[in-house]
Amino acid sequence: MAEDPPATPRRQHGHSRAYILDRLKRENLTDLAAAVEAGTVSAFAAAVQCGWTKRPPTLAAVTHQARKRRHRFQAIDGDFSAGQKMELIYGPGPQGSLFNSREELVRAWTVCRDELLERANAGRRPAGFYEFEFDGRRPPYGSERSTLWRMDLLSEAERAELECEWKAAFQEAQAPDFTVNDGSGELLRGDCARAAHYAWADIPRELVKKWSAARRRRERRSASSEAAAAK
């Protein structure tokens, strides 16, 4: 009688507690692994802090629970210097990194992530975010906010704040005599000035197109109403 084939082992997936624990141990993050095993922090929170997965953008804002997680990580890994936190925000300085190893850098981001994201301006992210949580190269500063908006990586509060700011900048450029000094001494006027202003304000082109179309519709309705009243 033929023997039954051996059972195929169940594959651990990237979000399972077992997989995350195994990876923490393989990457020598033993203190963090011990904290997960003890229940001090969740496996998912550890994976997010290490940059292995992401929370939904609407949950990215720092909440009471996020602050509690940060305190737990600080208890595990201790504090980091102001210079090291600056490196997590802006990247290494001309003299090189203040961290002694990649592992130490990962631990620093694990501890400081929520704090640094909380301190960042709307639509801005520290260097650590782009190192551990962003797919692709860091966008230029001048287009960072529209890039994160387009990739749906902003919280609802950030999106609302930026769209309000962008709408005000768009409205400012609608004056018939709107002009912009492009920095070379040349004075731009009309549509050229508006395009330069939109680029300077980093307004997503999708919003410019949407708001411009809405403005044209209002102008056509206004013209039709005036023509009807004149008859």
Image: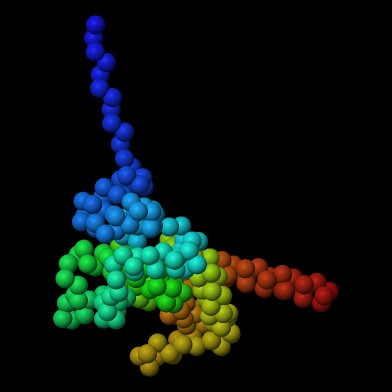
Q: Which residue lies furthest to the top in this view?
A: 1
Asked whether residue 135 appears in the rendered view, the answer is no
Q: Where is residue 21 in the image (x, y as percent from the top left)?
A: 29, 49
> For the point 48% across and 64% down, which residue is it?
65
Asked whether residue 181 appears in the rendered view, the answer is yes
User: In this rendering, is residue 228 above or below 31?
Assistant: below
Looking at the picture, tell me which residue is in the foreground, 57 or 146: 57
> For the point 68% across and 71% down, which residue is it?
218
Check the image and tell me how it is coloured: rainbow
In which quarter of the view is residue 227 placed?
bottom right
Q: Position of residue 194 (x, y in %)?
A: 49, 80
Q: Residue furthest front?
A: 38
User: Is 187 displayed left or right of 1 in the figure?
Assistant: right
Looking at the picture, tell me which residue is in the foreground, 54 or 231: 54
User: Is 104 displayed left or right of 128 in the figure?
Assistant: left
Tally of marks: 0
> For the point 34% across and 69% down, which residue is it?
74
User: In this rendering, is residue 190 above or below 138?
Assistant: below
> For the point 16% across and 71% down, which residue is it?
100
User: In this rendering, is residue 24 above or below 143?
Assistant: above
Q: In which quarter of the image is the C terminus?
A: bottom right
User: Is 45 displayed left or right of 228 in the figure?
Assistant: left
Looking at the picture, tell me which residue is in the foreground, 168 or 173: 168
Q: Position of residue 214 (x, y in %)?
A: 62, 68
Q: Where is residue 63 in the image (x, y as percent from the top left)?
A: 50, 67
Q: Quadrant of the N terminus?
A: top left
